[in-house]
Image (cartoon, rainbow, N blue to C red):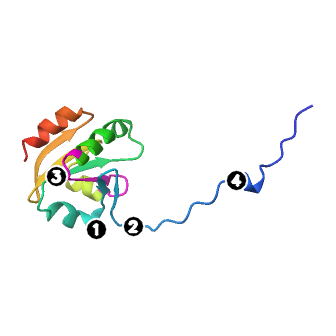
Amino acid sequence: PAAAFAPAPAALAPAAAPALPHRRTSFRLGGVAKVGVEEFGDAVLASELPVLVFFTTAWCGPCRLVKPVVNQYASDMAGVVEVVSVDTDEDLELAQEYGVYSVPTLVAFKRGEVQERMVGAFSYEVLSATIDKVL
């Protein structure tokens, strides 16, 4: 005979996730601030420091490979280079404005102007050497 399964007790059921606002403010995760359209001007274009923008998405496998490299670079270069991320699914208009057609893409800005662009997965050494040219 087929075994009957009882529903899990309420104590084991996962709690409902809190509702999230439609738009978020910037926040910092692992040394990299996540910014959206509202924060991009102040965080990137008006920054006194050079800024590396990491265009990414949650579903992107190569982005997950590059994320620790970007986080390490942000940590190592704190105070010299700002590093921010943009989720292209949430802020498609920024991706379109800066010609991001594939993720991961990193775009280096200095004084509000694009200086360098990297597309795809790369090592820490390649990232560092490429961005050092902008500094």
Kindly identify the residue that appears in the image at 11 percent across and 59 percent down.
112
Q: Quadrant of residue 43?
A: bottom left
Tag 4–tag 3 contact (CB < 8 Å):
no
Q: Nearer the viewer, residue 12 or 46?
A: 12
Work out whether mark 1 precedes mark 2 in sequence or the reverse, and give the earlier one.
2
Between the residue at mark 1 and the residue at mark 2, the CA separation in whole angstroms equals 9 Å
Q: Nearer the viewer, residue 33 or 41?
A: 33
Q: Which mark is residue 85?
A: none
Magenta-span inclusion, residue 99: no
Kindly identify the residue that appears in the image at 7 percent across and 46 percent down.
134
Work out whether mark 2 precedes mark 4 in sequence or the reverse, and give the earlier one.
4
Identity, as a three-letter code, of the amino acid under mark 4: Ala
Q: Residue furthest right?
A: 1
Identity, as a three-letter code, of the amino acid under mark 1: Glu
Range covered by the magenta-colored residues: 76-92
Q: Nearer the viewer, residue 104 or 111?
A: 111
Q: How many marks?
A: 4
- Nearer the observer: mark 4 or 1; the answer is 4
Magenta-span inclusion, residue 77: yes
Q: Which mark is residue 23?
A: 2
Q: Which mark is residue 13?
A: 4
Kindly identify the residue that appears in the image at 21 percent across and 56 percent down.
97
Identity, as a three-letter code, of the amino acid under mark 3: Val
Q: Which mark is residue 38?
A: 1
Work out whether mark 4 precedes mark 3 in sequence or the reverse, and give the earlier one.
4
